[in-house]
Image (spheres, rainbow, N blue to C red):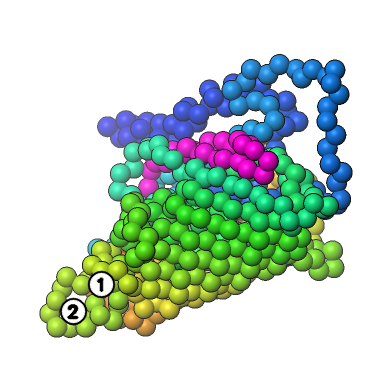
Amino acid sequence: MKNKRRQNKRRLFFLPVYFFWPLLYASAQQVPAANITVLLRPAQIPAPEVAARQTVPAPQPSHPDTVAAPNDALFGGDGWSYHFQFTGIVQGHPSFSSSYSGQNSQASDRQRAYSVTSTLYLGRKLWPGASVYFDPEMAGGKGVGSTLGIAGFPNGETFRIGNPEPTVYIARIFLRQHISLDKDHYEEVIDDVNQIKERLSTSRITLSAGKFSVGDFFDGNNVSHDPRSDFMNWSLMNNGAYDYAANTRGYTYGFVAEYVKPNWTLRLATVLEPEYANGPVLDVHYLHTNSENLELEKRYSMQGHKGTVRLLGYYNVNKAPNYKDAVAARLNGDTSTLDAIYGKKYGATKIGFGVNADQELSGAVNAFLRLGWNDGRNASWAFAEIDNTLSGGIRINGKSWRRQADNIGIALVSNGISSGHRDFLKIGGYGFMIGDGQLPNYGREDIAEAFYASKIFTNCWLTLNYQFVGRPAYNKDRGPVHLFAARLHIEL
């Protein structure tokens, strides 16, 4: 029986590879090797990687006698972009000290869990400046302790879904349109994940509409943003206090507008919120519930080293219960308010801010820093049960030890919650991820993460990861938790 369970886990780990590999192999045989780009962050839509900005003459028409070589490939030829990723993670922790446990506590005995995701990224040019993108995705497995009991959860590839069976769904399907504002200066954007190869004005307006992740556009970071290749913790892949709108798997429907200049970008978005906290279904009553996002990104160079600073603000309206109201009702004998997942009426708001920076320190060392805050009056509704956060760290490239494709990462994060949120947990309340049944001794949830990512084959990386979580779910009476993980990542 035990051997059979082990075999099932192995099948779960490699199922996405078996599912997509025939299609990828066939495509690779039909595409010249020179057109395949090695990706760095496949989980998110990257900021366009461009050649040096210059005035580029308009392309000349082909000679009338030139005949293009035949290409019968379904996704072949110019105007197509197609990539693939597979990520499998095994993570666990030994038993840790626990004075008590509640409904949403991380299991204090020894735990181990597996998770897999696999994504096919397809893009197609439609007309000048326009393209469409379609990303089918498969996910399976679960996080340690059923993805509960740690606010900054240690595996950003897992979701709060009880069924670990592999599931195929549409992650993204959206349309993008670029509008040129400068007809004299252009940049060449390379083929990448959810980015066709194209020639764009250095000053432009970019409009995107459809299904996507808010994290594809906002709170990006060149050092820490993708749990498939960088730091794995939820509160390191994004600003932990950024309660950005999303369903359980991290996606939403909406509209994004970006005003792009050579050294800065201003972007705004309006998107749908979930029907209930971290729920799988999005609420289509847009006039009653929505999320508005605004970010200013400034790119610069300091003594020849590139850097970026992003200033973020957001405003959410949804059904999230109010923490103080829930506490008052509980003191009056109403126990129905202990659940902060299902709100009863529209009108709850949340406002938040963030500062996010990354800086190249040398040819091999890059650093990042994030600071985030939200008002914490109403329940967390989509991303994480964190009301304020501070994080920072470095990533070191393996050039100095002749392993240029390898990386070492070290980061620290400290998460906290509002006074109302604390009081709610103290009386036995719980949200969609944390709630130990009581909280007599509050403390900040401090996390350290370190990893070594090594390229073991072409397009294949193996990462060893360690995380230390002090005071999980802000509880001094539980923990610390030591987590160990191995991650296999393939990208094409």
Residue pointed to by mark 1: 429
Read off the magenta span. Answer: 118-145
Name the image quarter holding the C terminus: top right
> In the image as oriented, which residue stretches furthest toward the left?
333
x and y, in percent, of residue 432 in the image = 32, 62
Q: CA distance from mark 1 to mark 2?
A: 9 Å
Q: Main secondary structure of the magenta part?
A: strand
Towards the viewer: 391 or 384 = 384
One can see residue 404 in this view: no
66 part of magenta stretch: no
Name the residue at 52% across, 45% down: 174
Name the one closer to the observer, 123 or 452: 123
Of the residues shown, which amino acid type is indicated by label 2? Arg
> Would you say 363 lies left or right of 30 here?
right
Give x and y (percent) for residue 111: 36, 52
Q: Is residue 128 magenta?
A: yes
Q: Which mark is residue 330?
A: 2
Q: Residues within 10 Å of mark 2 (few under 14, many from 20)?
A: some
Residue, x 75% and y 44% (percent of image)?
199
